[in-house]
Amino acid sequence: PVVATPVNPGPPTPTPPPTTPTVEEEKLLHFKSHVRSFVFFDVGGTLLLALSWSCGAVVLCFLGGPLVAGYPGAKHLDRPTIGCYLASSALKAIYLLFVISRHYMAIFLLAIQLWLLYIVYIFWRLLANVTPDRQRELVDIQRRPPFNSRWPY
């Protein structure tokens, strides 16, 4: 009988390390981590508003934006998905402003929502300057590089 012997191809070729991010890309990665964490504030605020208001089922429609578009879009640096989250955040801010603006909790949540909308907008705008190939490279960077600014917003 013929017995096959395994062939040792040698040591695996090392993958090249990702290139060092530019200042703009560092800022993008900084905002990536912020948007990913602020999604939970958005979800928490929506749930809090749904529990404290009589028509909470209507408010629960706004959970799709952060859960379906916000977190995955920030994780994968996907500009169209972040655009959907931006639109969802804008609709939620308009809803808070015009529909339930007399509710004491809605005024507080509107201020938070406008701040989140501003951060998501900056992140969406920063994503426009990065090519799709470079976005894939930046997704592979596991650490958030230090950003040398006291207030990046």
Image (cartoon, helix red, strand yellow):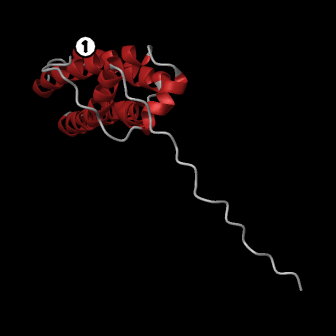
In this image, 58 relative to 49: left or right?
Answer: right
Q: Where is residue 11 in the image (x, y as percent from the top left)?
A: 58, 58
Q: Name the amino acid type tagged 1.
A: Phe
Residue furthest to the right in view is 1
In this image, 103 relative to 31: left or right?
Answer: left
In this image, 27 relative to 80: left or right?
Answer: left
Residue furthest to the bottom in view is 1
Question: Mark 1 highlights which residue?
Answer: 98
Q: Where is residue 146 in the image (x, y as percent from the top left)?
A: 23, 30
Q: Which residue occupies 45% across, 14% down? A: 128
In this image, 139 relative to 33: left or right?
Answer: right
Q: Which quadrant would residue 36 be assigned to in this image?
A: top left
Q: Which residue occupies 25% across, 13% down? A: 98
Answer few, some or many: residues within 10 Å of disc 1's Cα (few below 14, many 20 plus, some between 14 and 19): few
Q: Position of residue 64 (x, y in %)?
A: 40, 34
Residue furthest to the left in view is 104
Q: Which quadrant would residue 47 be assigned to in this image?
A: top left
Tally of marks: 1
Q: Position of residue 26 (x, y in %)?
A: 31, 25
Q: Which quadrant would residue 68 be assigned to in this image?
A: top left
Considering depth in this image, is 104 or 66 the residue closer to the camera? 66
Q: Which residue occupies 47% across, 27% down? A: 135
Considering depth in this image, is 81 or 105 the residue closer to the camera? 81
Element type at mark 1: helix
Considering depth in this image, is 55 or 8 the residue closer to the camera? 8
Kindly tell me whether residue 100 is visible in this rendering.
no
Q: In this view, does 7 lie above or below 128?
A: below
Q: In which quarter of the image is the N terminus?
A: bottom right
Q: Quadrant of the C terminus?
A: top left
Kindly tell me whether residue 105 is visible in this rendering.
yes
